[in-house]
Image (tube, grey):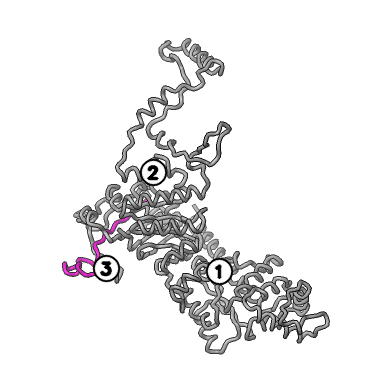
Amino acid sequence: MKIVKLSISNFRGIKETKIYFNGHTALVGDNNTGKSTILEAIDLVLGPERLSRHPIIDEHDFFAGEYVSSKERQSIIKIELIVCNLNAEQQRHFNNHIEWWNIESNELISNPPPESTEDDNVYPALRVQFQGYYDENDDDFKGDTFFSSPHLEDGSLSRFYNNDKRKCGFLFLRTLRTGSRALSLEHGSLLDIILRINDIRPKMWEDVLEKLRDVQVADKPEIGITEILTSVQNAIRKIVPSEWAKNPKLLVSNMTRMHLRKILTVFMSTGVKTSKGKDYAAPFQYQGTGTINTLVLALLSIIAENKQNVIFAMEEPEIAIPPYTQKRVITNVIDKSSQAIFTSHSPYVLEEFNPKNILVVQRNNEGYMTVVAAQYPPAIKPKKYKEEFRKRFCEALLSRRVLITEGRTEYDSFPVCARKLSKMNSELYNSFEALGIAVISAETDSQIAPLGKFLKELGKEVFAVFDKQTSDDLAEIESNVDYPFEAQEKGFENMVTNGIDIKALRRYALSLVNDGLWPTHLSENTPNDIMGEEELKGIMKTFLKARKGSGEAAELLTQCTEEEMPQFIVDTIKEVNNLVVNRSDDSSREAEKDSTEETDLNPD
């Protein structure tokens, strides 16, 4: 069974969205774009234990917190899923609710003729939904799950019960929150799920409870508690019949089976020994975070092996796990599940996915979410994509804004200059990291336009810096990026040496000589205190071009003050900063204005 389509309306930060899945999926995007909300939405529909919580939803689960219906509209959360790839048992179980899904056109076939269901692109599918609302009469939040088809005679929908959900085999793992109870016997824990899958029902509760009831605590006279309890008993007997307060004891607890399920947990060796030479074991949740998460994901593998047709949804499985373990766990879970859906910020996780299975999530201030499959970048073949994913493409996929540089030298230089300027004047400048800007090298000016188009189609805000271009090439770049910045010279090294303060250039050149770092093949033109300005610029251009891509230009620029840096670099960084900061301020003012207007209209 696989999820092929998800529709969300009025849930948390999402006013409206439709998402199409193509098998195993990684959801990526900036923080607070709604990736976790997507998984929570799926859990509301398919999670067998989800509706047992009270309240099922609350006011914060409604978009913008507006849960009270008005005359104009009913405030209702609606989440609908379409799943296909049903096995024979699932098709028998859901027989009356089966519909048909075309995987090529990504749509349901309404009332298909029998022969169309034999098409290779058409599969039996199940459409189910969650509806949640606020009941003013009961002053409570309510919600339930239903089959979306067919409608009953009165127009209502049949309920989608927990037993039905278990047939779908969905498991949502909130890594950090689940880890602490993964190896307890609490209902819904991973250990409990494994036991139920294997039809194991431990018959131990009564024996354990009986033994605990016989365990007396602090019954030795020298402790003193027994004497106090006897005094309590004597005081009570002066007021009530003697049989009412007979023989008080200090016992372990008044535990029930439910208490035991919560407190029983697996102990594991910590690798240390006590003073008596015994191995010291501690509860599972006291292990290191990395150990907990690794073991949690190992339990998932066990569940996948036993359950076979299972859908996993996981939040950031990479947390506190080293890269090699991330890759092994992800590939293991993918191999053993019918579908795995991850949210992730890890390049080691994301590089295990074909780009078409990486969904880039964007959401605007009105709550409308768009989700776009990444695809391969322009002019990049699959093998090269795999080799360069971590250093070139991953950060761009995960960010909201991207700065494209023409080559590696600019890629190294602009971020460090922005960082240096922000330290010298934090009121005017921010680092690119603080602005949420990822930097990516196009590696040649001919790739700026196609790379810009690719990133804009993913919903990114695209900046670009580049050398002087022909009018046609400039027009092509301008039509494919949001904010182009063109230098007025050809060659970054020329722009740097001609634009930098000559004192800073001489200072850096002499430091190379004094530190013994000046290259021997340029020994005939070694910089000195009396070398003329034009001669110094010429030899430093030669030096920087010879060291192109080695970070020398960036090192030179980081040793400059704001006044010493080339004006093009300073102006570009300042304008990028203004574009991002001013727009953020405008959005805040607009939100504040809307809030004020709403308050004025609703004085109560």
Decide which of 34, 131 is in the foreground and name it: 34
Decide which of 110, 22 is in the foreground and name it: 22
In the picture provided, is 57 more to the left or to the right than 400? left
Residue at the image point whose x is 30% and y is 51% from the top: 165
- Name the image quarter holding residue 42: bottom left
- The reply to whether residue 460 is in sight is yes
Q: Is residue 520 magenta?
A: no
- The reply to whether residue 151 is in sight is no
Front of the two marks 3 and 2:
2
Residue at the image point whose x is 51% and y is 44% from the top: 287
Q: Residues within 10 Å of mark 1 (few under 14, many from 20)?
A: many
Q: Where residue 235 sits in the image (x, y, percent)?
A: 50, 12
Circle 1 sits on which residue? 438
**The magenta segment:** 107-133
Circle 2 sits on which residue? 191
Circle 3 sits on which residue? 102
